[in-house]
Amino acid sequence: MRFYLLSDNVDTLVGMRLVGIEGVIIHKKEDLVAKLKEIIEDDTIAIVLMTTKVILLAPELISELKLRNQNPLFVEIPDRHGDTNMGESIDSYVSKAIGVKLIK
């Protein structure tokens, strides 16, 4: 089982390659959809790391994959700019999964 990275920038890809994680740069929704189909069919990939900007190319599709698929596990990681509020994303996914709005 291995990790795989879908990134919007070269810096993140190079950093992950330094620790042995393969991946690709994605800038278009069509490319993302095609790559996700390949990843889902590959039984050797256990965890897919995705930068926030890649997720924003197709947020509904990514949410569906996170909720529906057991393998691989899709994990959002901040890009080098770190301009995301991942806590709100996690709250949103949990709320959708259990059907209850979470209160902070």
Image: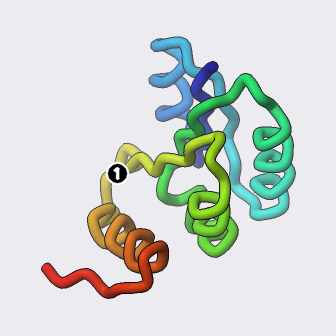
Q: Position of residue 13 (x, y in %)?
A: 55, 30
The residue lying at 66 percent from left, 53 percent from top is 69
Residue 19, relative to residue 61: is it above or below?
above
Q: Residues within 10 Å of mark 1 (few under 14, many from 20)?
A: few
Q: Could you tell whether 35 is left or right of 21 in the image? A: right
Residue named by callout 1: 81
Q: Position of residue 50 (x, y in %)?
A: 54, 47
Q: Position of residue 29 (x, y in %)?
A: 76, 63
The residue lying at 39 percent from left, 78 percent from top is 95
Quarter of the image that includes the C terminus = bottom left
Q: Could you tell whether 31 is left or right of 16 in the image? A: right
The residue lying at 84 percent from left, 61 percent from top is 30
Q: Position of residue 15 (x, y in %)?
A: 45, 23
Most extreme residue toward the front is 98
Work out whether residue 43 or residue 15 is closer to the camera in this orientation and state it: 43
The residue lying at 63 percent from left, 19 percent from top is 1
Asked which quadrant contains residue 64, the reply is bottom right
Residue 52, relative to residue 41: is it above or below?
below
Most extreme residue toward the left is 104
Say what amino acid the circle numbered 1 marks: His
Q: Number of marks in the image?
A: 1
Q: Secondary structure at mark 1?
A: loop
Work out whether residue 22 or residue 75 is closer to the camera in this orientation and state it: 75
Colour option used? rainbow
